[in-house]
Image (spheres, rainbow, N blue to C red):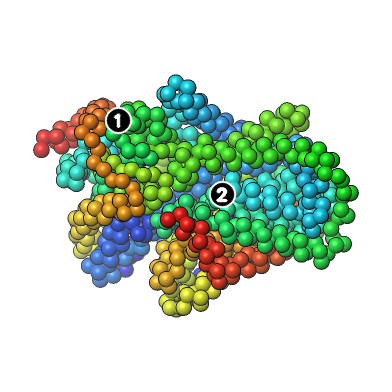
Amino acid sequence: MDQLILSGVLVIALLSLLASGVWVAFSLLAVGYLAIELFTSVPVGQALATNAWSASTKWSLAALPMFIWMGEILFRSRLSEDLFGGLSPWMARLPGRLMHVNILGCSIFAAVSGSSAATAATIGKMSLPELKKRGYDEQMMIGTLAGSGTLGLLIPPSIILIVYGVAIEESISRLFIAGILPGIMLVSLFMGYVMLWSALNPSRTPPAEPRIPLRERLKASRRLIPVLMIIVGVIASIYFGVASPTDAASLGVLFSLLLSWFSGSLTWKTFLDGLLGATRTSCMIAFILAGAAFLSVAMGFTGIPRELASWIASLNLSPYALIAALTVFFVVLGCFLDGISIVVLTTAVILPMIDAAGLDRIWFGIYVVLVVEMSQITPPVGFNLFVLQGLTGRNIFKVALAALPFFLILMLSVVLVVVFPEIATWLPQQMN
Amino acid sequence: MRSYLDHLYRISGYIAAFFLFAIFSVVIIQVALGLIDEILLVLIGKAFGLQISGYARFSGYFLAAATFFALAHTFKEGSHIRVSLVVQHLPEGLRRWVEVWCCAVAAVLSGYFTLQMASLVHDSYRFNDVSSGLIAVPLWIPQTSMVIGLVILTLALVDETLRVLLGQRPSYADAEGLLDQTSDETSDLTHR
Amino acid sequence: AENWDMPTPYPEGNFHTQNIIQFAEDVEEATDGELTITVHSNGSLIEHPEIKNAVRGGQVQAGEFLLSLLANENAIFQIDSVPFLATSYEEAGKLWEVSREKTEELLAQQNLKVLYAVAWPPQGIYTTEKLQTIDDLSGTSFRSYNNTTERLAQLAGAVPTQVEVPDLAQAFSTGRVDAMITSPSTGVNVKAWDFLDYYADTRAWLPKNIIVVNQDAFDALSPEVQEAVMEAAGEAEARGWEMSMEETKTQTEVLAENGIEVYEPSEELRDSLLEIGETMSAEWAERAGEEGQKILDAFLAN
Ligand code: NA
Ligand code: NA
């Protein structure tokens, strides 16, 4: 009961702070402070400092600013324009046309980056101005980016699968492999939705660019080569064992700098603008991450997530009912905490339930990622929403509304993975 | 005074950018060294283990410095995210007080954060805490970068609180996104 | 009644964590609930590198960490990780016996009271090719994460390659590293058979996890409760070492069951490794100074 009142107080405090316009990072810090100060005897200042230090100096986090910087460089060069110019003749007959670049771009990028914020930020920086210029529907633009940005977590490599794999002592490579089919499924669902939507809303799709013969099309495709070289270079550096994800991100920056230099669009000014832009965006995300990490540690001290999870455990539900209850639990928690925190705070309590219910741990990992991906696009605390608000200047609820169909598709994919667990388990089983 | 402060925020942003560039440089040099080793192994059958010891650790420290030095600059440029849906629909008079509230809350939190970080630095210094792993870095050094960044942020927030209190337009209100600003929250502040 | 928060670095299923959970239950039972301990495993509350300082500052009352993590503070903390110095449970126990007092003294300067320490299973070398002699390591990328592993790799003629824990699986499966030295437990945890084929049971060293409490938090307890804590700690230490031995046996078997070839190093390989060990012992003694030499002498004397 205490926990319930406490949770209520904290949720109301967070909502009031956010609604009154206090910056997200500060709101999270304030609520973390309240949680510890009011409900534990832990020295709150010390907890804040220790946590800020360890959350802000993570090696795996260093990939984020590098990817964002790469997006800034490409945005300022002609390369992103070339990408869309080269692709557009090929997509002319596909309903939704260049809108699919958001989804495919995010899924290719997800194979390089382990975080969804980096995925949405990098692709968004390149594609938003191009799509806007070509007259695509704004809401759909934002929605596809918010939705497919979450692929960063599902398609390997994935920070959250690493965190989960370490917690359950399961093979991380197996978890990575298990993410592939659900990732492809989600990409198809997203693309299917875009096609359906475009077919139903022809008035909100820009007129098709004139058809051009194959030879012209191939000629136009030459413009794709530089960008493809970057993508192939970065992916190859990871998969041939030269680079860790952060290394690969820095290589991406190097390639982008070199290419925009050769193409003549790199000047001292564009270089500095790009670097400063990346500095600001990554500062914004890292500061919110620090606030979220502090709130998460505060939750650890108060024990709320643990208690909630144990309460679910005490209900002794059947496997399907358990999954349904956990989905509600994760979605609600996901509105306020970031995905990785949820996994860290609750696996110790949830895993015994999973084992008792006879569910496969690898399958559960994929399920968790899908559910946690939703938390990236649910207000008030959703990282992809913050990233897109930063990019577009549109307020968070507008962004969240645009992302709603993709939230529902994620929900559908959870149902599919529950009904057909083989989607997640078949590939890793082939490894034996 | 005004221009001194604005210079300070901007310079602090440049320092942050420098640290971001430092991450890039360290990682690229490390990758290059590894590549040279691979090539040597093929050519002369021997690698030398060329590398920057503890480069991952250094990148982490640079990242913290980049994040915290950038805080004030990012704030002034309006790049920190907030929910302005309610604020934008308030009548102008009330809205000013809400902006004062936002800045003041942030200033108090930032001030508290600064003191606590400074106390962490003091502890690290007193106990001679060093990093674990390949290189023993005294922890107070990278931690100090965070304190300096927070001091500048606190200054910027106090500065902003006073400005808004005196009836000036908040400087963070000029931010623009990639999509043009027509019907959105930041624009009506701009056009005030 | 008093409640302590106790962060630990390893997952719930790890034998160290299991031992600590048992310790917490023992304390609760022995004190009739006067003192309860909430164990936060897997770095979920405080991350590994910060645990010591969090206990020191009183943010949490107790905690566990890998003792040799403090090697850069004082070389004494690293004695259990000098390669080929103590290579069996018996020797590791002796080494802890002779170094315990100095370790406690050093940690007491940071307001930390030592409850107990438990050894990890001995460290062996995982590779993609079977090692016949030390020359087979020449030119391989050898995972290093601290100065011991880096120096060991260098002396063995391998290329020390830094790989952080989050990058581990990927680094091995893409061939960025092709050898590592760690315990059978860690090998099983990361499912080493997914990317490695051979395990040389070199028993290079037995690192320890240490369990500490904040001295002020301990002093605030009543004498009866203090006594109950120390008693439970003594039991946990004895139980932990037993568990560790059992762990070595079962986890080495798990490695074999999953297709890793477990083998004893050849005479020749063993000799080369011992030679490296001697070099590193000498280097350690130099770093650790007079105090270190005293401990080393006491260990070698019996
Ligand atoms: Na990914
Ligand atoms: Na959310």
Amino acid under label 2? Answer: Gly
The x, y position of residue C192, in whole percent, is 38, 48
Residue at the spot 62% in from the left edge and 37% down from the top edge: A233
The numbered disc on residue A315 is none
Q: Nearer the viewer, residue A51 or A168?
A: A168
The x, y position of residue A342, in whole percent, is 51, 61
Toward which corner of the image does residue B127 lie, by quadrant?
A: top left
Label 1 sits on a secondary structure element that is helix
In the image, residue A399 above or below residue C297: below
* Contact between labelled residues 1 and 2, with CB atoms less than 8 Å apart: no
Residue A346 left/right relative to A130: left
In the image, residue A302 above or below residue C128: below
Residue at the spot 41% in from the left edge and 58% down from the top edge: A168
* Tag 2 residue: A114
Mark 2 neighbour class, 10 Å CA radius: few under 14, some 14 to 19, many 20 or more: many
Query: Cβ of disc 2 within 8 Å of ligand 1?
Result: yes
Residue at the spot 68% in from the left edge and 30% down from the top edge: A258
Mark 1 neighbour class, 10 Å CA radius: few under 14, some 14 to 19, many 20 or more: some
Toward which corner of the image does residue B62 lie, by quadrant?
A: top right
Using the image, name the chain to which the residue with label 2 belongs. Answer: A
- Mark pair 2, 1: CA separation: 37 Å
